[in-house]
Image (cartoon, helix red, strand yellow):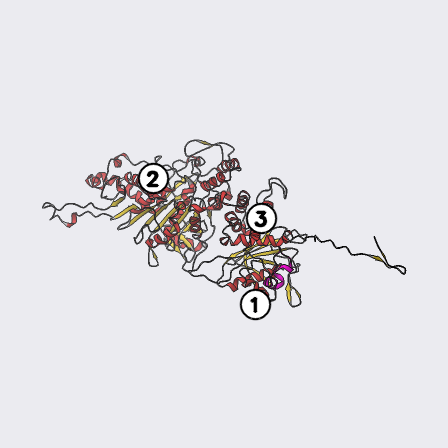
Amino acid sequence: MQKEDLNSIYRVVEDYIPKSVLSNKNKAKSWAYGYDQAYDLVIISKDGTLGKVVEIQNLKIGLPLAPKNCFKRHDKKEKQYWERKELPKELAKIQSIFQWNEMTKDFKSRWVDFIENEFDYRELGYWFMNNGKPTYITGSHYMYLQWSSIDVGYPDYRDANRILHIFWEACKADKRSFGMVYLKIRRSGFSFMSSSECIHTATLAKDARVGILSKTGGDAKKMFTDKVVPINSKLPFFFKPIMDGMDRPKTELAYRVPASKITKKNMFDSEDDVIEGLDTTIDWKNTDDNSYDGEKLLLLVHDESGKWIKPNNILNNWRVTKTCLRLGSKIIGKCMMGSTSNALSKGGGNFKKLYEDSNVEKRSANGQTKSGMYSLFIPMEWNMEGFIDRHGMPVFRSPEKPVLGIDNELISYGAIDYWEAEVDSLKNDADGLNEFYRQFPRTESHAFRDESKQSIFNLTKIYQQIDYNDSLIMEHHVTRGSFSWKDGIKDTKVIFSPNKSGRFYVSWTPSSKMYTTPIKRNGVMYPPNEHLGAFGCDSYDISGVVGGGGSNGALHGLTKFNMDDAPSNEFFLEYIARPQTAEIFYEDVLMACVFYGMPILIENNKPRLLYHFKNRGYRGYCLNRPDKHYTKLSKTEKELGGIPNTSEDVKQAHAAAIESYIEKYVGIDMDGSYRPSDEYGSMIFTRTLEDWAKFDITNRTKFDASISSGLAIMACQKHLYQPEKKESKININFARYNNKGTISQIIT
């Protein structure tokens, strides 16, 4: 197994809790299930102990302490793996709790320990030896593996599913979380796992409701009838509550005592003989923005949520159904959401936003993510059919010797090798490749690939670059931070400070030897490093818009070819944000220009930023539109600078500038015209690449990053847009004379 792949989704955090604290609290068994604010840790242990602390998708999770003895099917480690235990034949004959009550005392005493142990595994989780290592699975995962009948019998153990269930248990334990949104691969088993969770949750709860939604009402019904109901029907009797209605219902599973007719015979029966039911139900709803509106849910299973097609909108639906999972500020239910993603215009875009709003590293003051859920992504190679060994571990790369798989077939080819070969075969089919990426993603970017036919730029190169960026440790290449004036005194020296909440992302800053102080001429400041590069900016004039929102302000810095101590033809700065006031944005832009000593090309249809530069004395930093002579500029253009965005010629030139840059400096240059063919481009800013991929020249207002980056390219290549000098068609020849002597003579 490749260590880097393991660490990317599941990492053991060493020495997270001081050993003295860990030892004392384990001895007292005083660790509490739930979120531990003191250690910023979600504890999923229910026995009061704490063992390993693991990190999944940036969420730290505390597992229970491993027991001294856990189940192992064999003494040799290579023969230790998950093995489902069949229900003993004597118990398999019992179909209901009524039959159990009729059994003899001796029979019950022989089997009560077995049944109690099963309830303990369901509640506390289960430990077993797997290839020599004590391995913990949650109670939900145990119920799925041991007691959930699926289409192929019973599920295989996969370590990817162990990770998913640990993460899901943490979402249930964390009082700040509404659940999880799982970005998955095709055929990952999520529908069966979530169906099992429906049964697991509903058969333990009283007076509760479990709901199911999918991309269509028909899909939700099919999940209910083909997955949920069969799992319920094959539960062992000791887990199955009393039911009302049919064994194979079409709309609702009801765990309650059936209504009975009152007769003279039973009307005087003692209340002690009354049998109580759970009064819990599982049902499904048609796909609609208002599904389950106003109802209280203990669990909501959201399947195929990345495939909601207009007029249905997963974002609108979540805003409604989220209220079904809380009472005031208290979260009383959880959502288990999972899906692959459609193309962005076919529901994938809304799902992508919901997924990004579920990042555990981005929380509000109340400790919750924007969506309330936690996002989880497990790459393709972890859960690909045909590449899981007997121990449930993925075979990433082709092994030296064939490995026995969970299906008893030999594995001689690695999952990543298979994936790369498939990608190579589709390199000339952009739409086919993007569909393959969405179905079997190795990165989040793969999962949200869009249809290539909607882009005017070379999507192949853009996605090559995105894939390359995903493989990098971004902190080594990009620094997030803020600019400020030294000592808070404006128009002095600008300082850059790394800051995790900063609005700027930079990949290069000038060395201390590089001159960046503005040049002052006639009271106007001019940039000293125009020869090194330039900025482009998409500005805005209004601080806020009615109802909130509004487009972002965007700023990009790009270098030219140079022989100085600076990169050539590289974007070095990205800023895509909308601060609380427009003035903050203007000052951010100004400080960036002063810090790098470079000019800026700004759209002049929103002139407040241009006035900000002029009023502060920095008119010299604002480039004039390069497609006109100075004498042809309007009075306002001469006063402020900038370039209009309404001209069709400018729009076409802007798009052509981005297209040219992509061809030269993004992705792989197969012909080797601009760099070695095995060398990737240096465009490190993935948000901008994604904006280019979606860019629509007929509706440019949504694409702030594309506008500003295109202006930066035009600013660095302004010589390409200068109007040609037209030769005059009138030829006037003046006579020339030789004035030597007393009489002048015409020179012929």
Give the number of the mark in front: 2 or 3. Answer: 3
Marked residue nearer the N-terminal end (1 or 3): 1
How far from the left and from the top, in percent, is residue 422? Answer: 50, 36
Q: Which residues are magenta?
A: 617-640
> Mark 2 or mark 1, which has the lower sequence index?
2
Q: Tell me the CA gap for discs 2 and 3.
A: 59 Å
Residue 538 percent coordinates (x, y): 54, 57
**Residue denoted by label 3:** 656
The residue wearing badge 2 is: 146
The residue that mark 1 highlights is 488
User: Is 159 located above or below residue 641 in the figure?
Assistant: above
- Disc 1 from disc 3: Cα separation: 41 Å
Asked whether the residues under the numbered discs 2 and 3 touch, taking CB atoms below 8 Å apart as contact, a structural biologist would say: no
Residue, x 30% and y 38% (percent of image)?
230
Tag 1's secondary structure? helix
Toward the viewer: 18 or 361? 361
Q: Amino acid at mark 3?
A: Ala
**Tag on residue 107?**
none
The amino acid sitting under disc 1 is: Gly
**Disc 3, SS:** helix
709 with respect to 124 (left or right): right
